[in-house]
């Protein structure tokens, strides 16, 4: 899988959320934070997405549209991501994962930081083991995509709890908006 790099320009593509809403990337009006998560019941992913949900108004105010992708079916995602205030995309065939060079690794679950996050996620009550066709070995990835399709910033996670925090995302978005003003 070829990894993307900053400055690379993506051709427009259209997606559909798990609730049937269209999503266009790039978004002509806002930056897009395209994040790749693991499986629908992943306690680490769901804990992270709740942090995004709590600060979603700040993210929108910074001119960012949030889009989260899972390698799960829409039906598997509904109980976990169906109520989120941003776009969630089912990619059970991992086509987007391949397109963006998002990998899997045994290290995803072996890094000690993942254990703490997983325990916190399980304690929060929004977790389930991977279903058939899903994998606990997926790695997260984050991309900040400009209105012209340019990859402005990216992060390929090295373990399951290695993604941008909301503060990091806001810092990147604000830094990019200052460059274009």
Image (cartoon, helix red, strand yellow):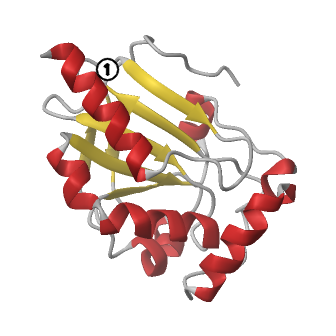
Q: In this view, does 9 lie above or below 173?
A: above
- Report the quarter where the C terminus lies: top left
Q: What element carries label 1?
A: loop
Image-based side of 75 in relation to 173, left or right: right
Residue found at x 48% / y 16%: 6
Residue found at x 62% / y 57%: 38
Q: Badge 1: few (under 14), some or many (20 or more) residues near its Cα, within 10 Å?
A: many
Image-based side of 134 in relation to 75, left or right: right
Q: Which of 152 and 131 is in front in this view?
A: 152
- Report the quarter where the N terminus lies: top right
Image-based side of 62 in relation to 84, left or right: left
Residue found at x 40% / y 51%: 166
Residue found at x 61% / y 45%: 94
Q: Determine if residue 136 is in view.
A: no
Count of number-bearing discs: 1
- Residue 122, picture quadrant: bottom right
Q: Which of 121 and 73 is in front in this view?
A: 121
Q: Name the residue under label 1.
A: 149
């Amino acid at each position: 899988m070829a990894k993307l790099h900053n400055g690379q320009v993506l051709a427009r593509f259209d997606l559909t959320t798990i609730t049937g809403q269209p999503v266009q990337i790039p978004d002509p009006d806002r930056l897009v934070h395209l994040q790749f998560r693991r499986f629908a019941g992943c306690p680490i992913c769901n804990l992270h997405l709740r942090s995004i949900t709590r600060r979603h108004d700040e993210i929108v105010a910074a001119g960012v549209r949030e889009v989260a992708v899972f390698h799960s079916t829409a039906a598997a995602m509904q109980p976990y991501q169906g109520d989120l205030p941003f776009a969630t995309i089912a990619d059970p065939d991992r086509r987007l994962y391949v397109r963006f060079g998002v990998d899997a690794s045994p290290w995803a679950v072996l890094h000690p930081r993942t254990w703490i996050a997983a325990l916190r996620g399980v304690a929060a009550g929004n977790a389930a083991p991977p279903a058939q066709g899903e994998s606990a070995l997926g790695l997260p990835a984050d991309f900040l995509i400009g209105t012209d399709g340019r990859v402005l910033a990216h992060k390929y996670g090295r373990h399951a709890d290695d993604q941008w925090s909301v503060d990091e995302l806001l810092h990147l978005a604000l830094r990019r908006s200052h460059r274009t003003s």
